[in-house]
Image: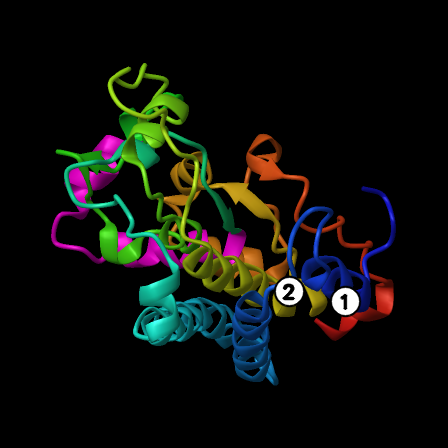
Amino acid sequence: MTAEFTAAAALKAITASRPGERPSPIRDAAFDAVRTAVAESLRGATGLGGAETAVAAVAQAVAIAEKMWAEVRATPAFALGTRPAACRKGCGWCCHQRVGSPAVEVLYIAERLRQRPDASTLIARLEAWSGGRPCVFLADGGCSIYELRPLKCRGLYQVDARWCMSTYAKIDAPVFGPPPSHEYQMPPKDVFDGAVFGLALPFHSAGHDCPGVDFVPALKAIIHRPDAAQAWWRGATIFPAEVRLHDWFPPLPKASKAAKKRR
């Protein structure tokens, strides 16, 4: 992707339905709600306080998305029109895949993780991680940072755990009964996918590179850098190139000398 970035082009790419996909009012509503709130929070955010504002905006985005998801799943239309999810604590098969996360979300999770009472245990597990799957935070079939899990994780609700077992964990599902179903609940995916890009776009539009990154290795790269958010806000490169996902946004054009002086 080499085209020069513009907010209008990114917005068009995000909200346009892909071939074979239906338009999603839920995804668009989540995108608009989060984008509007984050952009308002960032308005006027400068200097050292800008990084704090950026991290706080992630919590705001999560709250908006969770509230919308709660409202959606409380509707009769969802209850009557959506197959029940198989997801429950003790399953954990979905935790055997790479998870994309906006760079600013990783900064937020790192900061909150360092503040937890069990931080030393969780960070030690992260330090010991040397690649591969499952997720380093999967323990006893459950997520050990559940309340901090990325937005992408929040939207995944499969209707057949056998499909997750065979697809993500690469374990042959039992042959008894019908074949595993790949069906998943679309409304939560729409809510949290919309929130992901609604969170990232205002930062990217403002000139703060906010790529999608591979969550676990990106988190490991900054977990011992309490200054990571400040460095990122100033424009430093804090994530290794190999953790960047290249299908989210085009690279930011280099800032002009005038823009650099304004910073």
SS type, badge 2: helix
Of 139 and 122, which appears nearest the observer?
139
Prevailing SS of the magenta stretch: helix
Q: Position of residue 256 (x, y in %)?
A: 86, 62
Tell me the residue that label 2 is attached to: 201
Magenta span includes 115: yes
The stretch in magenta equals: 103-126
Residue 162 at least partly seen: yes
Residues under labels 1 and 2: Cα distance? Answer: 7 Å
Tell me which residue sits at (40%, 42%) in the image.
219
In the image, is residue 122 above or below residue 174? Answer: below
Whether 179 is drawn above or below 69: the answer is above
Is 25 on the left or on the right of 58, as rendered?
Answer: right
Q: In this view, does 241 lie above or below 213?
A: above
Q: Earlier in the sequence, mark 1 or mark 2?
A: 1
**Label ID, residue 215:** none
User: In the image, is residue 96 part of the stretch drawn in magenta?
Assistant: no
* Numbered disc 1: secondary structure: helix
Report the side of 163 relative to 262 (left or right): left
Task: Identify the residue at image location x=34%, y=75%.
Answer: 75
* Left or right: residue 25 compared with residue 94: right
User: Which residue, given by chain and number where applicable, does mark 1 sit on?
Assistant: 7
